[in-house]
Amino acid sequence: MDGPPTTDALSPRLRQVLESIQDRAFAARLRKVYLAAAQAVIRLSDMDLVRYETSSVDDSPDLSLWEEMAPVIRDTVMDVNGLLQVIREHFPQNVEGGLADVVERAVNETVAPSRPDDAVAVMHAVMGRLAQQVTELGEGMRKPEVVSDRWNLLSEIQRFRTRFRQEIGTLVHESAAVFADVHQKDVVPGFLEEVSSAVTVRATVSDLVRVVSARLDKIREAEPEDTQWHAQQLEKELDLFGKTPAYRALRAQDKRAVVEFRSKLGQMANRPTTKPELLEVAEPFGTLCKGLLQVNNRALLQQHDREVVAGCGVRLEQAEQALRSAAPGQPALLLAEAILSAQELYGRDPTLDGFLRKARKIPVASLGEGDVRAMLEQFRTLLASIPVM
């Protein structure tokens, strides 16, 4: 790992937790673990897999990629092992039962009953899982079906780096929770960035689903001589998606499917093609796009959505109260704030998406009382009906 991280790498809430620990020596050691965890998460998030991708899907072995990716695999292992070494150094796993253990346990229980021990237990449990996953990564990288296939190799590396980040987040959150009531977003390194990325992916994929579905409808209704033109238009729409941050954040195997479809579509766009031929390729891709909205099932996104819905509900209640008190302009302003906040739910429900798209084109903050009442009730009904877990 590169040079020592600074205290600024820790969130304000995590620094508060550390400052609240009475055993200052313990807090100092825990701080070093948290700093190492923050740096590991940053490094595990930094790699841009796009540079290793290809614009084609080829079944032939691609052993050259192994040489390209070997440094990435090495750095991944080193980043995780660097954190494990910090934990071992400051919180070694001692053999229990000796006199020293009895004395140390008695001292700890006198100073702060069980809490430090509970935090250490969390770190040791996560440390064990991380060490096991490092072993699994090494074993996975030796499988022929992984080493010889570019997309399988990228997928495996991406999967393990994600697992490592999740485990490190668990280490920080659960050990900090021993000392205070904390939320993941307030203490886990990179958590807010990961939520933001998931929100972006969902919104962009939702628009892709809408665009591809509309294009499929037009292809079904098109005259035979217009089929090639529609293939060209779909090709352009897909290329626009490929330039978005959401595309860069997709899983490698999902990108593989997009690249494969793009390759087939490019061939059809450059020659006369029949409607059945185009639909045979495009309809399964439409189904794939809808499948990408499974991002809604991610726990961190469901938690985020519940909080957004609750926040919108509070603002709508305030807007309704302002309507009753006849506060000039206040109801419209509160409604506008609620709708702006709800844009982070875009992609959760098609009906709500339609409402949010329409709201973007309306000066909500300037609406009159009657329009505010109508829009408020419609918005409240939509929020109540969306499938938030």
Image: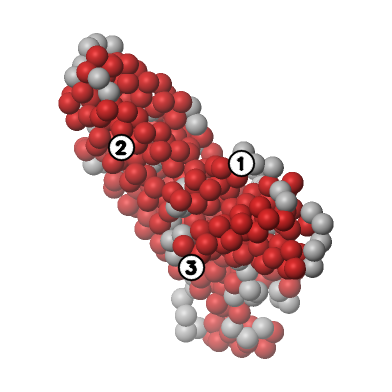
Residue occupying the point 24% across, 37% down: 284
The amino acid beneath tag 3 is His
Q: Nearer the viewer, mark 1 or mark 2?
A: 1
Tell me the crowding category of disc 2: few under 14, some 14 to 19, or many 20 or more residues within 10 angstroms, Cα based: some
Residue occupying the point 59% across, 61% down: 377
Colour style of the rendered protein structure: secondary structure
Place residue 49 in its image quadrant. Answer: top left
Residue occupying the point 31% across, 20% down: 231
Q: Picture coordinates of residue 59 (x, y %)?
A: 20, 27
Tell me the crowding category of disc 3: few under 14, some 14 to 19, or many 20 or more residues within 10 angstroms, Cα based: some
Q: Picture coordinates of residue 207 (x, y %)?
A: 45, 38
Q: Nearer the viewer, residue 273 or 113?
A: 273
Q: Nearer the viewer, residue 236 or 31?
A: 236
Do callouts 3 and 2 mark residues in contact (Cβ within 8 Å)?
A: no
Place residue 147 in its image quadrant. Answer: top left
Badge 2 marks a residue whose secondary structure is: helix
The residue that mark 2 highlights is 286
Badge 1 marks a residue whose secondary structure is: helix
Q: Which mark is residue 360?
A: 1
Looking at the image, residue 201 sits to the left or right of residue 20; the answer is left
Q: Picture coordinates of residue 145 (x, y %)?
A: 21, 38
